[in-house]
Image (cartoon, grey):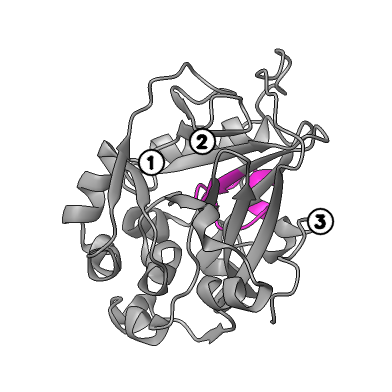
Amino acid sequence: MTSLPAPAPWTDALPEATPPAGMAIYQLPTGTYETRAAFALRGGSFRDKRQFAATAILVTHPFGDFLIDAGFGADVAAHVAMQPRFARAPFQATRTVSQQFDDSGYDRTRLSGVFLTHSHWDHASGLDSLDLPVWMNRGELAYAGSDSDGKVFRAVSPGHEIHEYSFDGPAHLGFPASFDVHGDGSLVLALAGGHTTGSVVAFVTLPSGQRYAFIGDLTWQLDGIHRRVERPWLLRTLADSDPAQVRQGILRSAALTELMQVVPAHDRRAYEGIPLLPGAAR
C-alpha cells in the first residue's frame, strides 16, 4: 500500500471558537451498504468486506440546529436503482433521520436546515422524507444540477427551499476558504472540493473543547487518513472531479488527527464516541 508523503502536523493555533453551553452533536445512522476494501482504498484487499455507513449528524445550537448530510431516505431502494449497475451495492436500511426524529420526540421547529458535505445519492437520499431547507454553495449547486451523480439529489430536492451560502471567511485549518454558520466558530464549513466541485469539510467544536472534522468523501474509510492512501485509480477516475484536489484534502485532514476526531462519512468506526439521539429506535 503506497502512502502519500506524511504532512507536517498542524502546529498553528486552532481557530477561535466560543460554542454556547448546551450545544451538542448526535449521530443518526440510517443503514449501510457493502463494498470491498479493494474498491475503497488503494492497496485494499478484495477479501476485506466493508460496511459503508450512511449516517447523518445533528448539530444542536441555540441559534438553530443543523443536519450534516441526510443519510438513507424512505425510497433508498429506488435511489440505489438509479445508480449505474457497477455502482449498485447490497444495502441494509434502518430508520431514516425523519423516523428517528419522530421516535425521539425531537422538535423539528428547531431545525434550520441541512448541509450536505456533497450532493451524491448516499448523502442526499434522506431529503425525500425531510421538510427543511437545504444549504449549498454555488459550486455544489452547479455540480448537483448537471452532473450524472446528482441524479438522486435532483429527484429528492424539489419542494425544498435552497439556501445558497458563500465562502466569505478565511482559510480554515489548511482549507482555502470558510463559512462560519453561527459566527462563533462552533460550526464552520470549509471548501474542500475535488470529490465534487463544492464538497466541504464540516468542522464542529463543542463546549467541552472536543473538535470534529466531518470530511465527507475525501476518503471513504479511516485507512485513507491514517495510512494516507487514495482511492484506487479507477475509482478516483469515476468518483472524483479532481483527484489532485482530493489528495490535498487527504493530507490536510491527516495533519489534524492529533487535534480532533476526523470522520470520513462512510466509516462506522469513525463515529465512535458520538452519542445517538436519545429515544431514537434503531
In the image, residue 184 above or below residue 269? above
Q: Which residues are magenta?
A: 214-230
Mark 2 residue crowding within 10 angstroms, few (<14) / some (14–19) / many (20+): many
- Place of residue 142 in the rendered image (x, y in percent of width and height, measured from the top left): 20, 45
* Residue 227 magenta: yes
Q: Badge 2 is on which residue?
A: 249
Q: Is residue 135 magenta?
A: no
Answer with left or right where residue 20 lies relative to residue 108: right
Q: Does dot 1 land on a helix, a strand or a loop?
A: loop
Q: Quadrant of residue 259?
A: top right
Query: Which of the two residues, 267 or 161, is positioned nearer the viewer here?
Result: 161
C-alpha gap between disc 3 and disc 2: 24 Å
The label on residue 259 is none
Q: Which mark is residue 194?
A: 1
Instruction: Specify the quadrant of the image occupied by residue 215.
Output: top right
Q: Residue at x 70, y 31 (%)?
A: 19
